[in-house]
Structures are given as C-alpha cells and as structure tokens.
Image (tube, grey):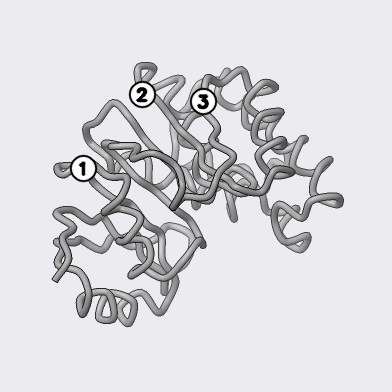
Amino acid sequence: MRSDDAAQFLENFDVSRETISRLEAYEALLTKWNPRINLVSATTLSQIWSRHFLDSAQIFDLAANGNSWADLGSGGGFPGLIIAALAAEKKPDLRVTLVESDLRKSAFLASAAREMKLSVHILSERIEQIPALTADVLSARALAPLEKLLEFSHLHLRADGVGIFPKGESWRKEVTAAQKVWSFDYEAYDSKTDSEAAILVIKGVKRV
C-alpha cells in the first residue's frame, strides 16, 4: 500500500484492518491485470486509493437503506467491488450484483472477488438484456450520460429505489438534457475527489 496515496482514503473512511487487507489485495490485482486488460488508466495506477477507491467509496453512505445494490458496467470493479468491500464490514446483509458484459473484465471481477473474499453476483451480459434486477440501489461510474442511466434505472431499479451516479463537471448539462425525457427527483452532493464533479442521488424516475 502506498502510504501517501492511501492516507487520503483513510482520512475519509474509518474501516477495519480486514477491509484494508481486502483493498490491498484488490490494488495488487489491478496492478497485475491492468497491462493486459486496461482496467484503469495506467497513469492513475499510482493513485489507486485516492483516484479510484475513495471516488467509489464516497457513494456508499448515500444509500441509507436497501438490501440489494446493483452496479452497472462495473468494468474494473468501480464502484461495485469497493461497495461490496465496505458492505462486508458495515452492511453484511447487502446483496451486491455486478453487471459487466466484457468477458475479460467479468473474469477479473470474479478473480478479485475471490481474492478479496467477497460474496458478489456477477452477470456477464448486456444491461438491456438481463431480467429486471429490481434493485434497491443502482450505481454506475463513467458508463453513460445521465439520460441513458435513467433508462437503465427504469429497467432495473425498484419504484422506491435510489440511483447513485458520480458525474463530472458537465453534470448540470446532463441533468437538463435528461429532464427533457425523464421526470425525476435528485440531489447533488459534492465529490470528495473533484471540486467540479458531483454525485447525483436520484429517485422517482418516470418517463415524461
């Protein structure tokens, strides 16, 4: 573990030694697999804890309730595997599903979950083709514009569920564009990793 990079994460999250060990194992796997699969930008490998772990973990507490969490387009495991790692300590009854259609990336997710000793359900299929997940919480990081994410929410989120979507500096424009097609309530929370970014917490998604 790079102490300088991990410090920012540990300043924001009070986690057990067991959770830290899980994340250290995850860091090692990302470093090992990334040259072959390109799970994250190579330039961010030295900042895994702050750039990826913290960015993913910050959404965990925004889902106050719910027993099922589905992460769409999980890729290298962000935020899904981080959510599962935190849940193992803080919400052990939370069921986490990772959806990733790329078979190489889903193989990585399965390997990482085993190494981290996490119980997750992995679906190696396209989001549009899987049966409705009826998740209590739905997340996606760097997957699609908000308008498309709300379409996925309409398919896979419970009527009283919540969508949690980290967005970059253009998040306001994405909200405006999405409101032309969808009706929804949202709150925007400041990102801990990017002063221009926001985390959108969305409820009540309906077609206009």
- Neighbourhood count class around disc 3 (C-alpha, 10 Å): few under 14, some 14–19, many 20 upward: many
On the picture, is 2 further left or further right than 20? Answer: right
Which residue carries the number 2 mark?
94
> What is the distance, in whole Å, between disc 1 and disc 2 at their CAs?
14 Å
Per the rendering, the mark at residue 171 is none
N-term-proximal mark, 3 vs 2: 2
Which quadrant would residue 198 be assigned to in this image? bottom left
Per the rendering, the mark at residue 161 is 1
In this picture, is 99 found above or below 183? above
> In which quadrant of the rendered image does the C terminus lie?
bottom left
Q: Position of residue 178 (x, y in %)?
A: 27, 74
N-term-proximal mark, 1 vs 2: 2
Q: Judging from the image, what secondary structure is the residue with disc 3 in?
A: strand
Residue at 67% over, 21% down: 114
Q: Position of residue 32 (x, y in %)?
A: 84, 40
The residue closer to the viewer here, 103 or 130, is: 130
- Neighbourhood count class around disc 1 (C-alpha, 10 Å): few under 14, some 14–19, many 20 upward: many
Residue at 66% over, 49% down: 102
Of discs 3 and 2, which sits in the foreground? Answer: 3
On the picture, is 159 further left or further right than 150? Answer: left
Residue at 32% over, 61% down: 151
Which residue carries the number 3 mark?
120
Q: Position of residue 55 (x, y in %)?
A: 50, 52
> What is the distance, in whole Å, between disc 3 and disc 2 at their CAs?
10 Å
Of discs 1 and 2, which sits in the foreground? Answer: 1
The residue closer to the viewer here, 128 or 3, is: 128
